[in-house]
Amino acid sequence: MTNMAAVLSAVACVLAWGAGAPSSMAQDTVTVAAMPAQAAAEAPEVQAEEQTVQAMGPVTHLPLPRFVSMKARESNVRRGPSLTHRIDWVFQRQDMPLEIVAEFGHWRRVLDQDGMGGWVHYSLLSGNRTVLVRDEMVELRMRPDPQAKVVAKLEQNVIARLGECGPNWCYLRVGSHRGWAAKTGLWGVGVDEIRD
């Protein structure tokens, strides 16, 4: 059982720091994650347990990964979690949904719908949820039912405010339009996410 405890400890360290840790910590993560041969044989148990336990951010103690939106009109995306790190690019779309995958102090490592990202200061992010239409066209319906009346059609890359979500449908607001859209055509909401 001591090997199992060591494996669980290693998994916890990897979950807490592995996704986007500063480069100075990356070597420690690799060292900590190394498993003896006997512990590797027990790894399937750990993987099954890892899937049922959601990682929590070491700073906010909120789930990782999680979705947020961009509060600012522009946001510098840096290579690491400080102002001294190089700016790789600039996000220029207010309310764009982003996925937080790591935390370090006042910095959050975020990804966009294409999997591109970097470190952004937390003050540039908002907990207000939005989604991005990723299909060519998504229909907003009066009810969460494929046979319900279509009230609007949203084109690809439209950003919508996210309301409640069931297993397959989410309630969206875009300007004066409101309605239900199938989750499959959206980015910024988890596949299994339920919202009231």
Image: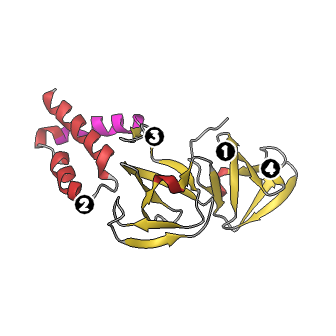
* Residue at 29 percent of width and 51 percent of height: 18
Q: Which residue is mark 1?
A: 168
Residue 52 covered by magenta stretch: yes
At a point 40% along the width and 71% down the height, the residue shown is 87
Q: Residue at x 34, y 60 (%)?
A: 82
- In the rendered structure, which amino acid carries the disc numbered 2? Ser
Q: Is residue 59 left or right of residue 176?
A: left
Q: CA distance from mark 2 to mark 3?
A: 23 Å
Label 1 amino acid? Asn
Residue 42 on the magenta span: yes
Disc 4 target residue: 179
Nearer to the camera, 122 or 164: 122
- Residue 48: horizontal and vertical position, in percent? 35, 36
For marks 2 and 4, give the CA distance. Answer: 44 Å
76 w.r.t. 98: above or below: below
Q: CA distance from mark 2 to mark 1?
A: 39 Å
Circle nearer the viewer, 2 or 3? 2
User: Which badge, 3 or 4, is on the more N-terminal residue?
Assistant: 3
Please provide percent x and percent y for residue 89.
45, 73
Q: Is residue 179 above or below residue 136?
A: above
State the mark number for residue 23: 2
Q: Quadrant of the N terminus?
A: top left
Per the image, the residue denoted by label 3 is 63
Give the residue drawn at x 60%, y 60%.
Answer: 96
- Kindly check if marks 3 and 1 are in contact, taking CB atoms under 8 A apart as contact: no
Task: Say left or right for 76 vs 169.
Answer: left
Give the spatial CA distance, label 3 vs label 1. 22 Å
**For residue 69, which quarter of the picture?**
bottom right
Q: CA distance from mark 3 to mark 4?
A: 28 Å
